[in-house]
Structures are given as structure tokens and as C-alpha cells.
Amino acid sequence: MTNTDDFILTMKDISKTFPGVNALENVDFSLKRGEIHALVGENGAGKSTLIKVLTGVEHPDSGSIELDGNLIQVRSPQHSQEIGISTVYQEVNLCTNISVAENIMLGHEPHRFGRIDWKKVNSFAKQALKRLDIDIDVTQPLGNFSVAIQQMAAIVRSLEYTSAKILILDEPTSSLDANETHQLFEVMRKLKAEGIGIVFITHFLDQVYEVSDRITVLRNGKLVGTYPTNSIARVELIAKMLGRSITDLNEMSKTRAKRVQKEGDHVLVQINGLGHSGVLEPIDMELNRGEVTGIVGLLGSGRTETANLIFGIDVPDMGSMVLNGKKVEHFSPLNSLKSGIGLCPEDRKAEGVLGDLTVRENIILALQARYGWFKFLSIPRQYEISDEFIQLLGIATPSPDQLVKNLSGGNQQKVILARWLATNPQILILDEPTRGIDVGAKAEIQKLVLDLAEEGKSCVFISSELEEVLRTSHQIVVLRDRKKAAEYPGDVDDQTILQTMAGNV
């Protein structure tokens, strides 16, 4: 059995300064053999910089690093691999068009008679994956497999050629469904049992509590503390991450209860049997003025498909939708925009922000599209609008002319919200608006959604985090297998929702 009291890594008083920014200030971090150690904190807390120091991407201004009790200086990423520190990033950096085996063996292929011995390549890769209890056809292109399997291949590659003592997993579950996450956790536990120390970076606190042994919290480049996972309550952990009172979080449920009554509290959108063959079964739903409608379900249950049908990205071939008493005849994003419907998409990088445009240009994009290109927003008006929403949402940017790709994930999400708020929508659909952003930004976005409802707008809030849906929603629609399974008032308990998602209700 692995001795988990044996420290494999000790980082002491690590400091790193960039021009105008103290990224790390006297931070301590340690890792035991056979331990899963979660590293958490808001965006800008210093997590990425600490990992860059550990992997040789950045060099500390001061402090020390000990590996196996020996003082070391990590010179480069290649050097970090040579001494047994491997990293698997959120975006898997492998070639999806070549086989699984080729990806695992790339640069290390065995040769026979001057040629690559493909039989050995495939055999070695298959055995390496079996170490993690993964049994797949390694001759198939990597792109044929799920993101979870692609991550397993990246883990295997990093372990097999570095004699890894430490494995760093940077947001590994951000694109995984529940089953894939479970599969990854089983692999992590297996590696832990082999004595490998794992640094687990994630924004999903439920996963932190499920799989980690200890938790280190960073805030504003400083160490808040390190705690055994079973010794710190979730609410206390959130408070330490935020560095402020969690009263705002607790007040959300009270705010939700104050459902506003405007214009007779009438139905804004009536959806009857709306669906698309092979995409989404017919669904009935009402979106009320002054309400947040939560949509929950497992990955693949039809959450995003529902959003796309309402917004007109996908055109329904059955059913009807009535908006403000008028039947919608033509479904398209442009018509939805003109009708006062906005959509913050699930994949903000691919479908939301335009990274090479400025904050200002991103914010005015939807409003300009609604006006048409013959009614051009003047540059002064663009700055006026962007400045208003930068201030309103607290977007952390040096100026409206900053490129969006240079902002943090949470601030990019705020830019997308600003884009749609600038159009003054009646209905705002938010598909996974808090995915991959820090706890503080999540709280701000959740509060904003409730504020919009108080103003009499209708919000659709889609999230894989049940806790935040329960916190923000006046009514909750549960989807299962691309159809509506049930609808509940916002004060429903989480067990009822989970049982419905599982098909037990």
C-alpha cells in the first residue's frame, strides 16, 4: 500500500512578478505520493502561473522546489518531463487524424529492419491503455473516440515516456459528460494507487469533493490555505475562494422567491409540441415574463437542442411557438434577434466571442446586426455602449479596445452577456453561461440573471450544475433522452430532479 505521508513535491515561498502584476507571492504547495491534490481559486488566483513554474514554462523570482527531497530548478517543459512531471491540458494536444497507437508512440516508434514495426506499435499502445483498464481498437483514428478516451491516450503517452512521478490534470473534465468523468476518476484512482501524485485543477467543486484528498486555495496570487478535503465544508471553501462574505450567494434564493408581477405576469412565449425529427422530441413549455426557467438534464438530453430550436439556429419541423401572442412563422437567428430573443451559446470560443475583435466590437455586434448594415452605429456610440456594459458587468479589461482573446474566460462570458444585453432582449437564453469560469464570476452571472428577471425579462438558464439551477430558477424543466421528462417549481429538492433525470420518476 502506498505511503501517502511521503511528500514527493514541496514548493516553498514561490513568487513570480510580471510587469505590473504580482502573479504569485510567497506561495507554498506540496504533493504526496499517491495523492490527488485539488488546486482551486478564481481566475487570476495564480493557479496557471504556479503550474507554469512547476513545469518550467516560467521561472520563479524567488522560492524553492524540492522533488523527492532534492532541491531542483525546472529549466524548461522538456526538463520537467525528464524529471517525471507530466501535464495533460484541457485541450488535448494530439493528432485526431492518426491512430490511437500512433499518438501514444509518436517519436518513440520501435523499428525493425529500418522500418517502423507497426505490430509492436499497436501492441505496446494496447498494453499501455490496459494499464488504465481501457480496451479499445488502437488502430482506429483518435478522432473516432470520445474526448474522454482522447484524454486517456494523452495520459498514457505522458506516463509511458517520462516515468512520471507527478501528473498535472488541467481542467480535464470540462468537456466530459458524467459517465466519461467517472471513467477518468477511475483512472486517477488507479494511478493514485500506483503511487503517482496528481495535481487536479478544476472549477467543479463537486468533483473536488468526490476525488481529491487535499485542497489548496489560491486567491490573488497568495496562498489562502491547504485543507484535507473531508475537513472543509463547501460553503466555507467558496468563502475562502472568494475572500468575501457568501451572503450574496445565500440571498439569491431569497431574490428568486420575489417573483415580480408585471403586465399581469402573462406568458411571454408559448411552446406547443415544438421539435425536430431525430434531434428533439416534441416539447411543451411556457416562458413567463419576470421568470427564470431552468433546463437540466444529462449531456445529450436535449438541452442545447432546445435552446437552438427556440432561437432558430435549428428549424423545427413540428409544433409551434407563440411569442407575445403572435405565432412565429419563420425561425432564424436574425428573426429571433429582431423579436427580442438573445442566445449566449454553450461553446463561447467557437460560437460566442470573436477573439480577434476588440471588447467594443464584440459588444455591439448583435445590436448592429439588428439595425442592419445600412444603419451603422457611430464609433462614439459604440464606445458609449461598450463603456456602459463594461462598467455594469464589471468586465476586467484595460480598455474597450482590448482584444477579447486576451481576457479571462469569465470576462469573455461577460462580454457575450453584454452583447445581448445591449439589444435589450425580452428573452435571454443562457446555455452553460458559467462553465469553466471561477466561483466569483459565477455568482455575479447568477445574480445578473435574477436581476434581469426582476426587470420583467424572461431568462432560460441551462446548466449541468444542478445547484446553480436550483438557486436561480422559478421553474425547472427536466429533459431526458431528448424529450421533456417533467416540470417542477423552483423550490423542488435536488433529489427529485436527480431521480427524474435518472428515469426513476
Image (cartoon, grey):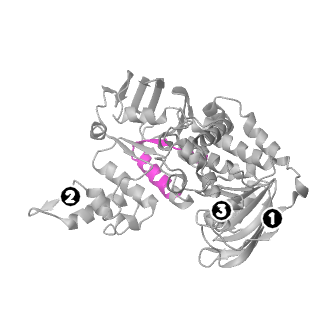
Q: Secondary structure at mark 3?
A: loop
Q: Residues in magenta?
A: 182-207
Q: Quadrant of residue 54?
A: top left
Q: Quadrant of residue 123?
A: bottom left
- The residue sitting at 35% across, 35% down in the picture is 57
Say whether residue 204 is magenta. Answer: yes
Upstream in sequence: badge 3 or badge 2: 2
The residues bearing labels 3 and 2 have C-alpha atoms spaced at a distance of: 43 Å
Disc on res. 109 = 2
Give whichever of 205, 257 is nearer the camera: 257
- The residue sitting at 67% across, 40% down in the picture is 444
Q: Identify the residue position indicated by label 3 in the image.
A: 297
Upstream in sequence: badge 1 or badge 3: 3
Do the CB atoms of the residues marked 1 and 2 lie less than 8 Å apart?
no
- Look at label 1 and name its amino acid: Asn
Quadrant containing the N terminus is top left
Q: Quadrant of residue 283?
A: bottom right
- The residue sitting at 68% across, 51% down in the picture is 423
Closest to the camera, between mark 1 and mark 2, is: 1
Assess disc 2: are there few (<14), some (14-19) or many (≥20) residues with their C-alpha within 10 Å of its C-alpha: some
Please state if 127 lies on the left or on the right of 454 as rendered. left
Closest to the camera, between mark 1 and mark 3, is: 1
Q: Identify the residue position indicated by label 1 in the image.
A: 324
Question: x, y percentage for residue 150?
Answer: 40, 59
Question: x, y percentage for residue 301?
Answer: 62, 67
Q: Secondary structure at mark 2?
A: loop
Question: Is residue 186 visible from the viewing direction of this image?
Answer: yes
Disc on res. 235 = none
Question: x, y percentage for residue 52?
Answer: 39, 35
- Look at label 3 and name its amino acid: Gly
Give whichever of 95, 447 is nearer the camera: 447
Closest to the camera, between mark 3 and mark 2, is: 3
